[in-house]
Image (cartoon, rainbow, N blue to C red):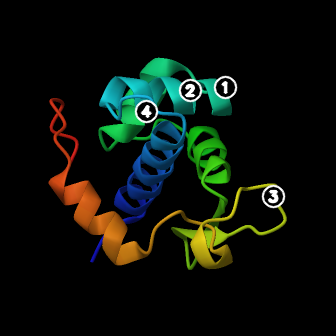
Amino acid sequence: MMTFRQNLRLFLWARAQHRLRQTGQPVTFSAAAELIAGATKVDLQKVRAALGGGFSTHDTQSRMARWCGLKFVPKHNVPILVADPSDAFERGPGGGIAPFEPEELRRRFKERDCPHECA
């Protein structure tokens, strides 16, 4: 079972990948990190760390989750991600909050070629 951090990292990568492809930019770790940092106002080094699997603070997690159309909430003292349809997030195919289905996200995440060994 995937952990909270793995799930958030998966959504971050998928949304960044989707946005980069829509604009015709190369889909790379650096481009994704820069895109996310610019959109969330989170420091680039923290974004790089988050894409690598670590999140420094609750604030960083919350900002990056919001960028994915999700919100970070505790349930039984365990962080979980829930859809936040109140946010102005661009909808994916079928009106979903993510541009891809979860199975497709996992496949893309496992198959991507990341020099930083983010998987």
Asked whether 19 or 2 is in front, the reply is 19
Quarter in which the N terminus is drawn: bottom left
Q: Residue 106 in the image: state x and y as whole percent.
A: 29, 67
- Separation of marks 3 and 1 at Cα, in angstroms: 17 Å
Q: Which mark is residue 37?
A: 2
Q: Point out the tag, 1 or 4, that comes first from the N-terminus.
A: 4
Give me the disc on residue 32.
Answer: 4
Tell me what residue is drawn at x 67 percent, y 25 percent: 41
Horizontal and vertical percent position of residue 59 = 64, 40
Residue 111 quadrant: bottom left
Could you tell which of marks 3 and 1 lies nearer the N-terminus? 1
Q: CA distance from mark 1 to mark 2?
A: 5 Å
Dot 2 falls on a residue whose secondary structure is helix
Vertical arrangement, residue 90 with respect to residue 20, above or below: below
The secondary element bearing badge 3 is classed as loop
What's the CA distance linking mark 4 and mark 3?
21 Å
Q: Nearer the viewer, residue 108 or 85?
A: 108
Which amino acid type corresponds to the residue marked 3 in the rendered image? Asp
Q: Are marks 1 and 2 in contact (CB under 8 Å)?
A: yes
Give how far across and how far down residue 21 sits, in percent: 45, 41
Which amino acid type is shown beneath numbered disc 4? Answer: Ala
Q: In the image, 22: left or right of 3?
A: right
Name the residue beneath numbered marker 1. Answer: 41
Image coords of residue 117 (percent x, y)? 15, 38
N-terminal label among 3 and 2:
2
Label 2: how many Cα within 10 Å (few below 14, some 14–19, many 20+): some
Callout 3 touching callout 2 (CB < 8 Å): no
Residue matched to label 3: 87
